[in-house]
Image (tube, rainbow, N blue to C red):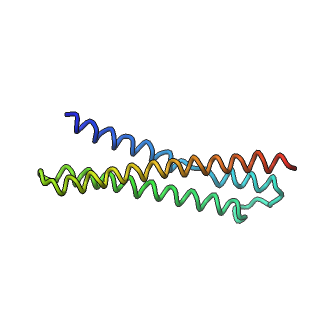
Amino acid sequence: MNKYFKIFAALALMFIVAQYCLAIDLSTKLGEAGTEMGVQPGGTELPAKIGAALKVVIGISGIILAILVVYAGVTWMTAGGDPGAVKKAREHIVNGVIGLIICLLAYALTQFIVTQIETNVLSLK
């Protein structure tokens, strides 16, 4: 029973982390910073493009890692007691969760950098 709880907790954590990775709105923040620096808004400026690119990359990474963890969970459940398959599935789950944590940290670091750019660069004007 404890083993199933750990698997369920890992999957629940994975979906919670994936939601944060997909809930990015960096293009708006970078666009606002660009507008304050004198760049005309319109979505084709560099800050808007950078924000959109980061949003796509981090979102796709979160989706891929979530799928990896689900695939590994299914592999583990269908291993039928084969120690090699269970070990491989466990490694995939660990790697997927580590990847999701890295994705969340990348989002947090990007948010921090954008916030610092907004506050420090915009305060120089």
Q: Nearer the viewer, residue 76 or 15?
A: 76
Q: Is residue 92 left or right of residue 119?
A: left
Question: What residue is shown at x 76% (from left), y 59% (from top)?
Answer: 41
Q: Position of residue 79 (x, y in %)?
A: 16, 54
Residue, far top: 1
Task: Say how many tags the image has.
Answer: 0
Q: Position of residue 7 (x, y in %)?
A: 28, 42
Question: What residue is shown at x 57% (from left), y 46% (from top)?
Answer: 108
Q: Position of residue 92 (x, y in %)?
A: 31, 55
Q: Is residue 41 left or right of residue 55?
A: right
Residue, far right: 125
For the N terminus, the quadrant is top left
Q: Nearer the viewer, residue 88 or 9?
A: 88
Q: Position of residue 52 (x, y in %)?
A: 61, 59
Q: Is residue 85 left or right of residue 55?
A: left
Image quadrant where residue 71 sits: bottom left
Residue 25 vertical placement versus 4 (above, below)? below
Q: Nearer the viewer, residue 35 or 57?
A: 57
Q: Nearer the viewer, residue 91 or 41?
A: 91
Question: What residue is shown at x 35% (from left), y 55% (from top)?
Answer: 67
Question: What residue is shown at x 74% (from left), y 48% (from top)?
Answer: 118
